[in-house]
Image (cartoon, rainbow, N blue to C red):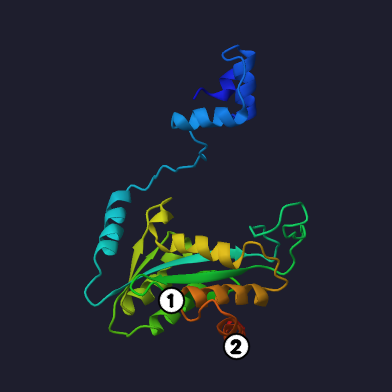
Amino acid sequence: MSSPQSLIGTTQWSLSKLREYLVRQKIIPGVSLSWLKELLQRHGIRWRRTKTWKEWKDLEFWPKYCRIRCLYARRPPGGRRIGVDEFGPLNLQPRHGSCWARKGKKGAERHRATYSRTDGVRHYLAAYDLETGKLFGQFKRTKGWKDFLQFLKWIRRRYPASEPLHIVLDNYRPHAKAEVLSWAKANRVKFCFTPTNASWLNRIESQFTALKKFALENSDFQSHQEQQAAICSYLAWRNRRRSIAVEPWRQSIHQSRSHLRQVANHAA
């Protein structure tokens, strides 16, 4: 459990380095790597990854935190809870991932390397309905306050006008634009801002992990339309609009292409 920096001058141990150190220091005459690993496990020592953490500097951290936690704990009467955030930017680039493959260097898939990306980026403005568990959104070329306001209006039209929307979102500047706040107040939309450096309080964040894994990782899309179709295909399965089978998947492709044409026309 000693720091390797003070003992051997490296930032972390490995089994081979630990064994060499123990033998060179004459702590033990010798040991196999498998037995050394077994000894560590018997003493409850396992390989673990380090993590980062942030200190919050928001003076209103606890009031904001408690407000969001109370919102999660109890649905407001007649209201709906929605998490909103931007996913992206979405570049056209090869993304490594994982796949089943046979042993050998030629078994796994390979992707090209790229250093120039000239097709611009897209942003996926996403919403997570806590009542239904559905994840949905719109693709945008930019994510300024006008794009965000259009997205909010699109969300508002999905629900009855009499139903208040309680939206959890971070402190990205366009979210707090005066025009956005004015529209929200006039349309029964209430914002719950997460504290600074605490966007993890927004439950939509955990939904992006699976979206990235199953729609983007291990891919090399050649156009934004192809990339967006893959995201829509995953969301169709995630939102239970299709099953994992050949025919429903093919049907979803045609529906996604039709949807993307409508989105492109709307964005234009």
Name the side, left or right, on which 194 lies relative to 8.
left
Using a 10 Å C-alpha cutoff, classify the residue at mark 2 as few (fewer than 14 neighbours), some (14 to 19) or many (20 or more).
few
Snapshot quadrant of residue 184: bottom left
- Residue at the extreme left: 77
Mark 1 and mark 2 in contact (Cβ < 8 Å)?
Answer: no
N-term mark: 2 or 1:
1
Taking 263 as reference, is 148 above or below it?
above
Which quarter of the image is occupied by the C terminus?
bottom right
Residue 258 badge:
2
Snapshot quadrant of residue 164: bottom left
Residue 144 badge:
none
Query: What's the residue at 42%, 56% (across, down)?
Result: 199
Q: Position of residue 154 (x, y in %)?
A: 45, 81
Q: Nearer the viewer, mark 2 or mark 1?
A: 2
Q: The residue under label 2 is which amino acid type?
A: Ser
Give the CA separation, mark 2 to mark 1: 22 Å
Query: SS for tag 1?
Result: helix
Name the side, left or right, on which 36 lies relative to 60.
right
- Residue at the extreme top: 26
Instruction: Name the residue tied to disc 1.
Output: 152
Taking 158 as reference, is 84 above or below it?
above
Query: What's the residue at 61%, 74% (across, down)?
Result: 230
Q: The residue under label 1 is which amino acid type?
A: Leu
Residue 14 visible in image? no
Query: What's the residue at 29%, 80% (across, down)?
Result: 163
Q: Position of residue 224 (x, y in %)?
A: 67, 73
Using a 10 Å C-alpha cutoff, classify the residue at mark 1 as few (fewer than 14 neighbours), some (14 to 19) or many (20 or more).
some
Taking 130 as reference, is 114 above or below it?
above
Q: Position of residue 190 (x, y in %)?
A: 32, 70
Query: What's the residue at 32%, 79% (across, down)?
Result: 186
